Image (cartoon, rainbow, N blue to C red):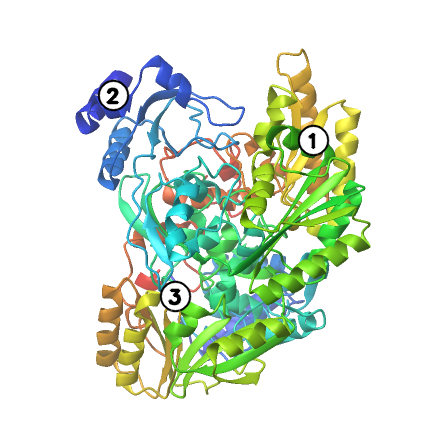
Amino acid sequence: MAMSLIADLERLLGSDRVRHHPLDLAVFAKDAGVVSGHVIAAVLPDTTQEVAAVVRLANQYDTPIVPRGAGTGLAGGAVPVRPGLLVVLTRLASIGEVDTVGRSVWVGPGVVNLDLSRKMKPYGLHFAPDPSSQQACTIGGNVGTNAGGPHCLADGTTVAHIYAAELVTPTGEVVIVGGDAPDTPGLDLRAVVVGSEGTLGIVTRVLVRLMQDPPDVATLLIGFPSVESAATTVSDVIASGLIPAALEMMDKRMVEAVENFVHAGYPLDAEAVLLAEVTGTPASVRSDTQRISAIAQDNRAIDVRVAVDIDERELLWKGRKSAFGAVAQAAPDYYLHDTVVPRTRLVEVMERIYEIADRYGLTMMNVFHAGDGNLHPLVAFDAKEPGALGRVQAAAREMVLVSIEAGGSLSGEHGIGVEKRDLMPLVFSAADLDAQARIKEAFDPDGLMNPDKVLPKGSRCFDASGGPL
Amino acid sequence: MFRRIGWSAVTDIGTSISSSFPEIAMEPSVTTARCEIVVAPRTVDEAAQVIRHATEHGFSILPIGSGSTMREPRSNIALSTSSMAGVIEYQPDDLTIVVGAGMSIGDLEDVLADRGHSAVLPESSPSRTVGGVVASGASGYARLRYGPTRDRVLEVTMATGYGDVVRAGGRLVKNVTGYDLSRLATGSFGSLGVIGSVCLKLWPMAPASRTVRVDNAGSALDRLYRPVAILETGEGVSAYVHGSVATVESDVALLGGTAVEGFDWPCHDQPPVYAEVRVPARMIDDALVRVREIDPLWFVGQHGVGIVEFGLSAHDDAVLESLRLWAQGLGGSVVVTAPGLSSRQRWGSPGNTIELQQRMKHLFDPEGILNRGVLPGGV
């Protein structure tokens, strides 16, 4: 069956855009996370019509389809769990004409996040979501995971930045969800397609919202004598009614790793640092900078540095965005969490997470979106060391439970994929999961579009009304 | 499938509901003439019980908040959220609040004003309920700066059309855990379920605000950094700005117009026919020209957003259809609210997602008892 599917795909796309060499299949069997899967073939379509034709062909062969962007996801969302066809969307990378009045542009899912903002620079516009992987990750992947990033604190995650999406449905039809005009009549299918991790169809074009570049920016780097005083500062800044453009936190271990890696001038004597950015008119940037400095000083900040120019600002951000690369110095492998907690509970949850890491004897570093309570404890380890992975996973589960007990959730921006799928019942009841499974069923009645993701098996079985199972 | 509406049915339905749910408040329908009885469950669980009872007996249900938007379709039972109207959890330091769906947005904003917060809901209709605003997906004028209401809906509890109670989303400002049913419920007009409570993301309100009369909307939009709104009415164009005192003063100086303190939002009477033309934001000037030609009672155009709302004294199919044809040609729509309109007259023709919409409706309301026909295409 597989060979005849491949032959049909080659007839459709030509052999150079259908990859099934064992080396290709090994590369495409993983994303940036820990899960690996089984790829029958990876195809690289150039157009929406080709994507639709591939989907219809896969349907004929009853073969699961998994869409993939750059493969930077961490939760296994782009990894075929059952043997499946991988639809790689990196070649759909066109950027349309910029609407400078409506501030939007149609782009292909294969456009790289940072490239989009760079190309919008001459118009004084940018795309707000800015994941740490923005040099590699694609807009399609951002749509799939409803990606975040430091600057989503004030501007919201990807769903707030997608006006419309062209979608190839799981049965191979092409529809547009959302629209160029506001409030498309009918159910807002756009809002569930964004963040659905490629399980409701394949997004082949999106109309993205562009934001004005701010007239003025200030970036502050603040050192603290303890994690607690930094976390309290975060809570106090939000509670004071100030929403900075970004509010990021790093602990001492992470600062050391980053300093060794990029030499950004982070304070090595601090137990924790905050990276805060305020944007707006020069007057508001001045007053917000003063307010944040004052709140930090009330919380015993030992060092407040305001970047004086664009070079210094970019260096400070380079430190933040290189964090995951820097970790490689500490250990060959890492496990990264993505839980979210209410911002008022940051201090206590951080304390408990440190306690868990200590108890398991793990090397943990923290670099995270403190302003919206999105934690990224990162455990560095060596998978070759006997028992190491087991300890990491046991600690991970405890950290997740601590976050959920505090009113938190499993993922703030990375998605559920396969990795956190079976933890979903910790957050949702059987009835909640059944309702979510109905959304999936409405789009994908045959269950061939990126199956076995997001919802645990059996989610759709719960039905209090006694309707069809 | 539905019972015929008539006096005998009133007695039947009233008896049926009151004998099964003696604790739930109920009254003959006065305000919603198209229903026979108003039932006001106190919790979302009770709402689900009423839905299950209605399913069993073949009664149809119209979920209502204040009744400002939803007067149709003709249904047996109006399921009112008026007994679910309190603050459930306010976390001022986290900038989130959970409220019962029946709370009015005026009462909500009063609670929030004490802490200098706002949920940024429609400014001009304080009697509308939070549940009603979320269910109808309505946004206020400040959406240019703060985005539509749906961007602030973090969590919803809902009694579904199949009689389950479900919670979707979470009380967190950032969350990608599972399919976001709360975003789907927003703007669903009660077609999938009855919303019992909503968690909203809040914004701190700036210390100073000004309304500035300007000559040119496009130039104000270009020159200002994130204005709250730029509105055009029959009286002219106003830019709404806020921030620190220094910021608003510099904005006013930049615009050079006359400024008044605070936000002077347009206000107008509830017209017999209310309509919105929605087009890509770059087409707003053309939309304004066309709306002016209709000679409406009043109009408000939202620059940078692409919506012109207007009031008419009577429904005129030919005029509205011609406007609609133009808007749909641009990928937009015209939405008309007036008594007795068909789905086609209200929304225009359904888009190419109609089959998906029908399947979604069927999975959440298999018996079709909730607000059938309220969405485009009669979904």
| In the depicted structure, whether residue B222 falls above or below residue A109 | below
| Residue that carries the numbered disc 1 in the rendered image | A256
Residue B98 position by quadrant: bottom right
Residue A90, image x, y percentages = 34, 34
- Disc 1 chain ID: A
Q: Quadrant of residue B311?
A: bottom left
Task: Please report contact status of discs 3 and 2: CB closer than 8 Å, yes or no.
Answer: no
Task: Name the residue nearer the viewer: B298 or B28.
Answer: B298
Q: Secondary structure at mark 2?
A: helix
Q: Residues within 10 Å of mark 2 (few under 14, many from 20)?
A: many
Give left or right: position of B238 versus A362: left
Q: Nearer the viewer, residue B213 or A5?
A: B213
Q: Nearer the viewer, mark 1 or mark 3?
A: 1
The front one of B270 and B145 is B145
Q: Is residue B302 visible?
A: no
Chain bearing tag 2 is A
Q: Is residue A50 left or right of residue B199?
A: left
Q: Residue at x 49, y 55 (%)?
A: B183
How packed mark 3 is, by other alpha carbons closer than 10 Å (few <14, some 14-19, many 20 or more), is many
What's the amino acid at mark 2?
Ile
Task: Name the kind of residue labelled 3 in the image.
Answer: Val
Label annotation for residue A6: 2
Q: Amino acid at mark 1?
A: Glu
User: Circle 3 sits on which residue?
Assistant: B374
Q: Quadrant of the N terminus of chain A?
A: top left
The mark lying in front, picked from 2 and 1, is: 1
The residue that appears at 38% across and 78% down in the rendered structure is B216
Q: Tag on residue B80?
A: none
Q: Where does residue B279 sit, x and y in percent of width and height?
A: 32, 67
Instruction: Work out whether residue A70 or residue A66 is closer to the camera in this orientation and state it.
Output: A70
